[in-house]
Image: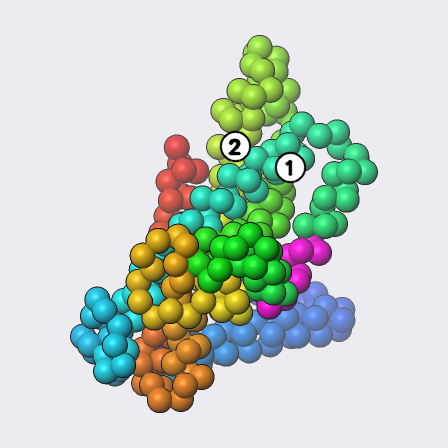
Amino acid sequence: MEAVNNYSIKQKWNSYKKDPLSLLLFTAVSSAALIIIGLLILLIGYILIKGIPNLTPEIFQWEYTRKNVSMMPAIINTLVMTLLSLIIAAPLGIFSAIYLAEYAKRGNKFVTLIGITSETLAGIPSIVYGLFGYLMFSSALNFGYSMLSGALTLSIMVLPTIMRTTEEALKSVPDSYREGSFALGAGKLRTVFKVILPPSMPGILSGIILSIGRMVGETAALIYTAGTAAGISQSLMSSGRTLSVHMYALLSEGLYMEQAYATAVVLLVMVSGINFTSSLLAKKLVKR
């Protein structure tokens, strides 16, 4: 086995010698990958070194005070905000993608326009979404600084990501699957839900995972819509800060730097845990 690997390496090296441009591109790509990995390790290491020593029982108390600077209310608000945003955005994005990929005519100008619009929305800065959410939900609809305003704003933010990834996942399924299902007498709706969606689940879940990561780490859009109240939100119409907003508030005050680093550790662990759990779920769905 080692002899085969050495032979393949020698073949690649000889091909690079014959084509200097390939060697240059290989070196550039490898260097970029090493730089990215190194920066990631440094960033995670810095956060863990600065934050882990400050993870004390006081910052996990149920109620927030100026003495304990507890992040537990922010953790609960983050979970509620993420779940509420997914309940709004995920069904709307998935079913919109199903219509665009399976029911709308391919090459339709309307479908092309929707694709361009969704890609444009995906690149808009979050502060713009925050200002829109403030003007639309907080002011025009009189929701005020509330969890509902923040969830609706986050739903609009992640909707293009969920819709585009789902659409690409559906298009990646071979047409032979559809033709075989129709040949056996299945209808359009049954074909979509029984034949097309199962092999598309990994791609759909990847879009949802990306959306969750953006929602958990979002700050600018929530400051203008959900507010910065430090306690646990009592209802959908009351204000509450998420974990990222909590960390921003501590850093901006400049009085609780140690607690801010501890919050960064918890935020990193939470995002990593959500991604890991979603990946396991996607693998189980693929096996089924």
Q: Quadrant of residue 56?
A: bottom left
The answer to whether one can see residue 180 in this image is: no
Q: Name the residue carrying label 2.
A: 197
Q: In this view, does 153 lie to the left or right of 67?
A: right
Confirm whether the magenta stretch covers residue 49: no
For the residue labelled by badge 1, is the local secondary structure a helix, a strand or a loop? helix
Q: In this view, does 126 lie to the left or right of 77?
A: right
Q: What stretch is highlighted in magenta?
A: 119-127
Q: Give the residue at the far bottom of this rendering.
A: 255
Residue name at image x 40 percent, y 62 percent? 239
Residue name at image x 71 percent, y 46 percent? 115
Residue 234 in picture, x, y percent from top left:
31, 57
The answer to whether one can see residue 163 in this image is: yes
236 relative to 30, above or below: above
Label at residue 171 = 1
Model colouring: rainbow
Residue 180 in picture, x, y percent from top left:
60, 18
Total count of labels = 2
Question: The disc labelled 1 sits on which kind of residue?
Answer: Lys
Which is nearer the N-term, disc 2 or disc 1? Answer: 1
